[in-house]
Image (cartoon, rainbow, N blue to C red):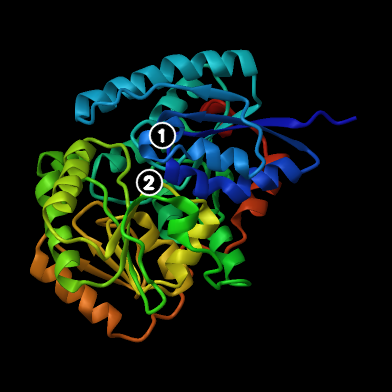
Amino acid sequence: MQVKRKICVVVTARPSYSRVKTLLTAIENHNDLELKLVVAGSALLELYGNAVQVIENDGFKIDAKVYNVLVVENETAMAKTTSMAIMELSNVFYNMKPDAILTIADRYETIGTSIAAAYQNIPLIHLQGGEVTGNIDEKVRHANTKLADIHFVSSLPSMVRVLKMGENPKFVFNTGCPSLDLAAEILDNPDLDFDPIKKYGGVGADLDISNGYLIVMQHPETNEYKNARKHIVETLEVIRELKIPTLWFWPNVDAGSDATSSGIRHYRETYDLSHVHFFKNMAPMDFLRLLYNSKGLIGNSSAGIRECAFLGVHAVNIGKRQEGRDRGKNVIDADYNRKEIKQAILKQINSELPERDFIYGKGDSGVKIANILAEIELPYSKILQY
């Protein structure tokens, strides 16, 4: 009887789960693979939506929980949070003894997973390498790539960049982004069949969204975190002026999140935002249905670049957080300037829906990745790869 390969996936933050949900299912369902799931970082914290509840509600067994976040949102706290991730995850991996470990994308703490795996000679799999953005994620992503042994990239340009970094073509695969698998699923049933406010609570007035609504998801830029409050006020002012029903999602835990959050709270208490409702978190499928039926996504989330392009939804991308990332025709870029942001939103909502774009895949990535993981060599040294 063939022994199943034990694949450990580490989820460290709210958005990371939606990126790998279908991959987790594909690994679980594969006859030759065994899923070991570790949830760490802000994914465990109520302050940032407690993604672990969504994960457990979806039926996944969590094999280890790692509490490592220093909840003081500046660059020093980011470094210390990462150092604690290395220490705690090192113990988890030592005891778990997985055949390979998967780290996701580019959030600052993901390098903790990579170091803890690589230093123990455990084969490391990296998802979504080779992309370009305008903040600390850029450095972390490429560092993860060099620490990793197997690479599943989301687009052809990303694959080219990973190969230019000297990675062996034998272990670099353009599988597309697994987050689009969920987006593909909702196209079979795209109707908004739930009331987001009744289902998820949040803060703000009860809204009538039957005639359309905007979604805002804006995170601080870690390279400019001291300007986070100023940045969020520009967007808040535009949303206040437009008076369009708006569903606003809380920022990720990054340097500058304190200032972003306090700016939102101050504005909410000072001005009339009775047409805005605020959420911490939402199940991935519900969020995608909400996104698909919206007038567009405003802010700097990668969802505007990935999921919105795939679904054919307008996006106004603000600032430099996603600078350099491959994008479709659905995106208009704006600086942190209320006039630019307002003009971009009005142009988008008064335009026809954009055509769907398949830059990041066609929605079949999870099964592809699982099938490759079941058969590929699992090297732990760059020398062994050649």
Q: Is residue 119 visible?
A: no
Q: CA distance from mark 2 to mark 1?
A: 9 Å
Left or right: 6 as drawn, with respect to 237: right
Residue 367 is at least partly visible in this image: yes
User: From what the image shows, is residue 20 above or below residue 294?
Assistant: above
Residue at the outermost right position: 1
Q: Quadrant of residue 53?
A: top right
For disc 2, the marked residue is 280
Residue drawn at x 42%, y 29% is 41
249 left or right, relative to 135: right
98 relative to 170, above or below: above
Residue at horizontal 39%, vertical 58%?
A: 303
Judge the density around disc 2: few (<14), some (14-19), many (≥20) Cα neighbours within 10 Å.
many
Residue type at numbered disc 2: Lys
Mark 1 — residue?
46
The residue at 31%/51% (across/down) is 132
Question: Residue 183 at x, y = what percent?
Answer: 54, 63
Q: Are marks 2 and 1 in contact (CB under 8 Å)?
A: yes
The quarter of the picture where the C terminus appears is top right
Location of the N terminus by quadrant is: top right
- SS of the residue at dot 1? helix
**Residue 337: image location, x then y, percent:** 9, 63
Q: What amino acid does circle 1 point to?
A: Glu
Q: Is residue 65 above or below residue 346?
A: above
